Image: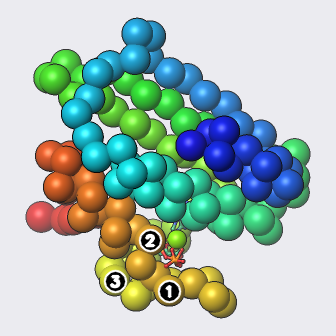
């Protein structure tokens, strides 16, 4: 995914940092669906950082082996993030603060992550 999106990320002046677990933890997954998750998060990150000055745009992608059989994948950006009052909303279908956003990216990510036995992302008790 990094290779596929490198041009787009570079064009937007984003520095990419990676920190991968060695050896790479083996996971059984639907490759295309997992790529979709990373792609959506990466697009969101680049968009979230677009109003920042270029030197401050950083995307961090890391993997860690979990104590159980799983792997943890994190995609982190250096944008100010979400206002506290709307922190629950991004995973709602059709919630978008972008002019041309549909508001479906994170909804799709969540269903893929849950289908792979991942955590209940964005759900509050
Ligand atoms: N990395 C991020 N930093 C800050 N806010 C974010 C980030 N990712 C998502 N958001 C917020 O969550 C909203 C929903 O994200 P989501 O990916 O579901 O939809 P979208 O990006 O607006 O549209 P699309 O359907 O094209 O993905 C965004 O509009 C934005 O307000
Ligand atoms: Mg999106």
In the rendered image, which quarter contains the C terminus? bottom left
| Element type where label 3 sits in the image | loop
Which residue is nearer to you in this view: 5 or 56? 5
Residue annotated with mark 3: 93
Location of residue 19 by image quarter: top right
Q: CA distance from mark 1 to mark 2?
A: 8 Å
Is 73 placed above or below 48 here?
A: above
User: Which structural element holds mark 2?
Assistant: helix
Position of residue 125 in the picture relative to residue 82 (left or right): left
What x and y, as percent, mark residue 1? 56, 43
Q: Is mark 2 within 8 Å of ligand 1?
A: yes
Above or below 14: residue 18: above
Q: Residues within 10 Å of mark 3 (few under 14, many from 20)?
A: some
- The reply to whether the residue tagged 1 has its Cβ within 8 angstroms of ligand 1 is yes
Residue 77, above or below 21: below
* Residue 116 at x, y percent in the picture: 19, 48
Give the alpha-carbon distance from disc 3 to disc 2, as whole Å: 9 Å
Looking at the rendered structure, the secondary structure element under dot 1 is loop
User: Is disc 1 in contact with disc 2, using a CB cutoff of under 8 Å?
Assistant: yes
Asked if the beta carbon under badge 3 is closer than 8 A to the nearest atom of ligand 1, the reply is no
Residue underneath mark 2: 105
Label at residue 102: 1
Q: Of label 1 and label 3, which has the lower sequence position?
A: 3
């Amino acid at each position: 995914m990094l290779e596929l999106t490198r041009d787009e990320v570079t064009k937007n002046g984003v520095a990419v940092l990676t920190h991968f677990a060695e050896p790479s933890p083996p996971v059984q997954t639907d490759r295309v669906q997992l790529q979709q998750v990373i792609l959506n998060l990466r697009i969101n990150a680049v968009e979230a950082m677009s109003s920042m000055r270029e030197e401050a745009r950083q995307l961090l992608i890391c993997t860690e082996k979990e104590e159980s059989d799983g792997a943890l994948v994190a995609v982190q950006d250096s944008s100010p993030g979400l206002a506290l009052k709307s922190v629950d909303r991004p995973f709602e279908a059709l919630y978008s603060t972008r002019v041309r956003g549909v508001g479906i990216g994170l909804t799709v990510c969540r269903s893929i992550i849950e289908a792979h036995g991942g955590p209940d992302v964005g759900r509050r008790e």
